[in-house]
Amino acid sequence: MINVCFVCLGNICRSPMAELIFKDMTEKRGLALSFNVSSRATSSYEVGNPIYAPAKRTLEEHNIKGGHRSCQLTKSDVINNDYILVMDSGNLMDVLRLTGGEYGDKIFKLCSFTDNPRDVADPWYTRDFEKAFNDIYDGCNCFLEYLLKEKKEAFDYDKRH
């Protein structure tokens, strides 16, 4: 099983979008049993709040459904996940600060797996949830392709169940 945690500042827009998009991708490919997918916030600002309505609406427009409540990232979350995928450079710095610079081998910007490495556009400020969706979808798709190529043995679980 591969443990993946998506991270952004408040865990109400980008990281829950990534969590639900990635879950949808793995489900459609018959790989859901090989993953444990979650999302977290680097801050406590929104803890306990649901996914932000415009983010949820954007997901639903793409036929992606699911619920979510914001949770704050802990060092234990970093230790217990195989991949920590952050949305932007600020999130990356926050996670590295939380871990004291440890575990850098499992912390990546989501879009670093794409042909166009970049930060995921922050819709909280731009109000462009479709742009954020496209960045996240691209990042999730490229990350999954990376895993399928580099970690083939991890997907035997789905074949057995």
Image: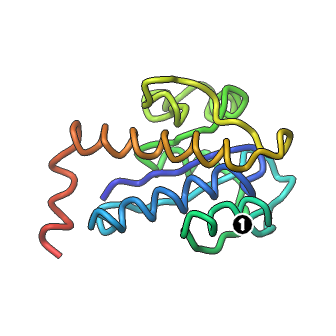
Left/right of residue 6 with respect to residue 68 in the rendered view? left
- From the image, tell me which residue sits under label 1: 57
Estimate the x, y position of residue 113 in percent, counting from the top left.
Answer: 43, 31
Left/right of residue 92 with respect to residue 70 in the rendered view? left
The colour scheme is rainbow
In the current view of this chain or complex, which residue is farthest to the front? Answer: 61
Nearer to me, 143 or 39:
143
SS category of the residue bearing label 1: helix
* Above or below, 96 relative to 143: above
Residue displayed at 56% across by 50% down: 76
Residue displayed at 63% across by 38% down: 87
Q: Amino acid at mark 1?
A: Arg
Q: Quadrant of the N terminus?
A: bottom left
Nearer to me, 2 or 123:
123
Estimate the x, y position of residue 29 in percent, counting from the top left.
Answer: 29, 62
Residue displayed at 52% across by 32% down: 111
* Above or below, 43 relative to 22: above
Estimate the x, y position of residue 149 in percent, counting from the top left.
Answer: 21, 38
